[in-house]
Amino acid sequence: MAVGDYSTDFHIVPGVRLGGVPCGIKGVDQLDLVLFEFVSGSVTAGMFTQSHFAAAPVLVGREHLDQRDSRYFLINSGNANAATGDEGKSDAVTCCKALSQQTGVRPNEVIPFSTGVIGEKLQVANITDALPELIPTLDETNWLLAAQGIMTTDTRPKIATRLLEIEGKAVTITGIAKGSGMIQPDMATMLTYIATDAVVSKPVLQELLKTGAEQSFNRITVDSDTSTNDSCMLTATGVSGVGCDAGAARASFQEALFSVMQELAHGIIRDGEGATKFVTVNVSGGMTRQDCLSIAYAIANSPLMKTALFASDANWGRIVMAIGKADATVDHSKIDVYLGDVCLMKSGGKDKNYREEMGAEVMEHAEITIRVELNIGNETETVWTSDLSHEYVTINAEYRT
Amino acid sequence: MAVGDYSTDFHIVPGVRLGGVPCGIKGVDQLDLVLFEFVSGSVTAGMFTQSHFAAAPVLVGREHLDQRDSRYFLINSGNANAATGDEGKSDAVTCCKALSQQTGVRPNEVIPFSTGVIGEKLQVANITDALPELIPTLDETNWLLAAQGIMTTDTRPKIATRLLEIEGKAVTITGIAKGSGMIQPDMATMLTYIATDAVVSKPVLQELLKTGAEQSFNRITVDSDTSTNDSCMLTATGVSGVGCDAGAARASFQEALFSVMQELAHGIIRDGEGATKFVTVNVSGGMTRQDCLSIAYAIANSPLMKTALFASDANWGRIVMAIGKADATVDHSKIDVYLGDVCLMKSGGKDKNYREEMGAEVMEHAEITIRVELNIGNETETVWTSDLSHEYVTINAEYRT
């Protein structure tokens, strides 16, 4: 299942080539090895999981990115190379070295990424043996192939793209993402790669990535679970020659970039494991943003709320319950709650005009907004989530079998 | 579904009488109104939910308990009288007053309790009209009837009982509980009533209740959701004449009381919504108890871990993921993880002797222990939980329909 339409259209990003082949990790003839190549001079910003058990490729990738700008991303799906200790790190480095030998770049100009089952030794030979076949597939037009190659329980590829005109010249932003379960990213989503041909300096790129993530990948949750491999990468090749570090150019670039990030983040929720609903939870009128966020996540992660959404049951008692348990300052006698445009609760009690049919009508839709007005301050936060369906249980009960 | 055997045996508690009748809130002829009567001179300690949306009866009950010792508990199931504002409070008080008029006690010697659907006006007339029929049913032997009368999605009554000999005299402790979903109590579980004929002063009773709850009701989770109506009451009638405030008598009494509390708390998990597994999560070797508790709850509440438990899949990567996301100080290279007696992970990586069949064998059992050794300190914590099954989704998708 997945919610809403999606598009696989994209614009190529000058300076970026992509490739992909099956290497036998996921199964016979399944695309599971993907390569990004960036033209010399490209600048990359990255954010990685905050998990205590950050996977081996995350540890290696952080080091490499600190040392040099990246020329290649080497990504396998099917095995997360997480909880694999020192051997896992050395396996990730071996893959970088093998690619370095065949491309002439330094090993630390390669960043490794893995996604899939946790706790299994990485199939290094499958990856290194496939490189001679992988490298010749590099092509500017392979964005969709790459989006497909990084999928695990995803049911559809996630791709977002913008073509802007800045100072009379064309600038492109295109990104792909994967992720469907184990999704409540903490600093970044599972795997996201965004590239642009704009000219952006590394500090600005890092700042844009961080700010954008706080409005997209760091505001989504499928199941409250945080991956060991979350990584979000933003690369600027500079091939367009259009500087976007400041002024109106930066404003235009930032707006387009943030909308790409939000589209990819929403794409992950729309394709959340077993999702039948795309739910926006907005909390406003709080004293602090953290208060608003705590309440929004309490609602978005409540199994009782999520099963009610699956059942299209306007069970607003469960919204009240979730607000009640959140770690936040509230005055319950001032709280209003809306489902779509329907007011369920006014000043802490059932709204006098509310009738069950009104809530039921909103719940029939696949896209639903829950809005909580705390009425004690001026802060607001929004998170996005999916529902909890039988298919979520089926997918996760059968994932390894 | 429910896990393990259970007993409905109990000892009567001298000084306590119980009654129950159907009053039409839950449906035709369904037992939904229960009354406890305590002999004059009884002392009661109580703990209530910490939810911002504490239900009307909780607000009224806290006040009444502060003012006087309780002579009656009046409990309805089917309607939680939560998120009902001032009208809800006045409805709860009306019920207390009606009982007071028919029994001759003061209104604040009655504590009201409600459990069921949130956000609906309480059916006050159903309750007050049923009182003339309810009061004559009071009898010392009605503990099981009361346990049945407070059930909502519970599939079986929960009752625990101990008969001790202290200073050569008999002392009884008997308790009942209800709760199956919306269970991660914050200071108390949904509804628990424990009574004893020991002589215990109010401060000691309150201290015992608090300490015992920290090892029982405050360490269980079905779905991470915290009820608006959680209440846990402990009443000492003193009829046995055996003082248990201090010394060896207190030690014996405390041991028996805590085992009753733990048995009731475990009973709630065994009867957790859709439960097919009873899972003990023990985290030891942490620097603080809070660190251990954060990790234990991260594991116990992870939807991915809970679906793996439902599938009897020894997917230890999900244990690693949950440890990784917990807010706690860890050194991942020192962590060992056990499933039953089987070591899955040693020093942060897969144990060399571990084979999939070994984990699978443990997972086949209905009662499973997950043990995490952090190896950086001396603190430990234990929580208990159930799995996430299709039936959980079915129960909560269909609760109101």
Image: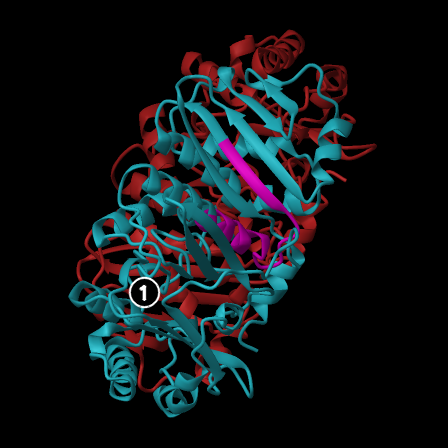
Chain colours: A red, B cyan
Question: Residue A378 sits in which quadrant?
Answer: bottom left
* Residue farthest toward the right in the current orientation of the protein: A28
Residue B293 on image: x %, y %: 41, 36
Say whether residue A113 is left or right of residue B174. Answer: right
Residue A71 colored in magenta in the image:
no
Residue of label 1: A372
Residue A216 on image: x %, y %: 41, 46
Question: Who's the residue at 27% across and 80% down the image?
Answer: B96
Kind of residue indicated by mark 1: Val
Is residue A209 at least partly visible in the picture?
yes
Say whether residue B199 is left or right of residue B293. Answer: left
Question: Residue A391 sits in which quadrant?
Answer: bottom right
Label 1: chain?
Answer: A
| Chain part drawn in magenta | B260-282
Residue B276 colored in magenta in the image:
yes
Say if A29 sits above or below B334 in the image.
below
Say if A295 sits above or below A360 in the image.
above
Question: Who's the residue at 64% across and 35% down the image?
Answer: A150
